[in-house]
Image (spheres, rainbow, N blue to C red):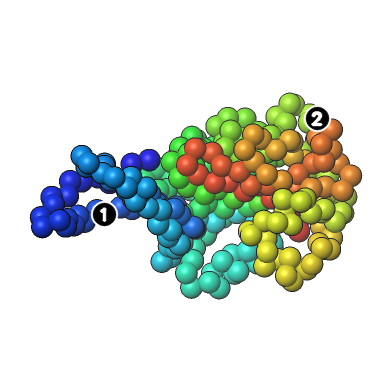
Amino acid sequence: ALLASGIAHVKDGKAAIDLTITLERAGARIVEVALLPPPGDTIPANDRRLVTFDVARERVRVLHVAGRPTNDVRALRQWLKSDASVDVVAFFILRTPTDDELFTEHLPSFDAIVLQDFDAQPYGLEKYLPNVERYVRGGGGLVMVGGQNSFVAGGYAGPPLASVLPVDLDGTPGATSADTSSFVPDWTPEGRAAPLLSLLRDVVGDELPQMPGANVLGDVRPGGVALWSHPTRTTRSGAKMPVLAVGEAGDGRTIAMGVDGAW
């Protein structure tokens, strides 16, 4: 993508130009700086340079929407708030005009949305799901955390939100939405190598803790990556069922974590 361009006027064999660019996504970034070769250029190899940047946000703004005040919800909210660089807006029930404005006007002000064990339908969130989809495709982040009211059970199997998740969801009437048998997730090769989970691996090593249950998820969507998988359950295609997966939708990023401690 072209970020900026301009014309430099040469005087006494030298020229300078100021170009302002904005890098919208955090992380390691590479920017190419190049010039159109002038007539008689005999060293075209020096007309191009690659410059690296480590882009970091001063503060990350997170919207945390949860369905029940469980220990898992409290633990996640407290963990997010313990980081001074994270600004958390958290609530359980959407019923006020302020909440309407939050999903119609202020959604772009958040860097990520966390939907944790939340059923969209009883609280009026369902009508805002198209806004959430556009927010993700426009560059926002979405994390869906599992539970009794997440994924299929929370009414997310159909469009528009299912199209931005990194895993398929089976919205067929009567389809199994959860498996409440305890299990220990398996690391996938991609999960072992993922920088996202490096700090966790430093703490727990190769053996993850036992989980009390899992949401039933489908195959990883094109472009997605499974980081944890279920040790015994498989998808319709016969692949090991993903438990934790990441992916991209448009310019945004999504995470699906199909486990929760409040089964």
Q: Nearer the viewer, residue 169 or 66?
A: 169
Residue for badge 1: 20
Q: Position of residue 45 (x, y in %)?
A: 37, 47
Furthest-left residue in this view: 11
Residue for badge 2: 237
Q: Position of residue 12 (x, y in %)?
A: 10, 57
Q: Position of residue 238 (x, y in %)?
A: 84, 33
Q: Is residue 172 visible?
A: yes
Q: CA distance from mark 1 to mark 2?
A: 48 Å
Give the image quarter of residue 35. Answer: top left
Q: Is residue 73 visible?
A: no
Which residue does the image show at 73% across and 35% down from the upper left?
219
Query: Which callout, 1 or 2, points at the residue further toward the start of the chain?
Result: 1
Which residue does the image show at 72% across and 50% down from the upper left?
190
Circle 2 SS class: loop
Q: Nearer the viewer, residue 170 or 226?
A: 226
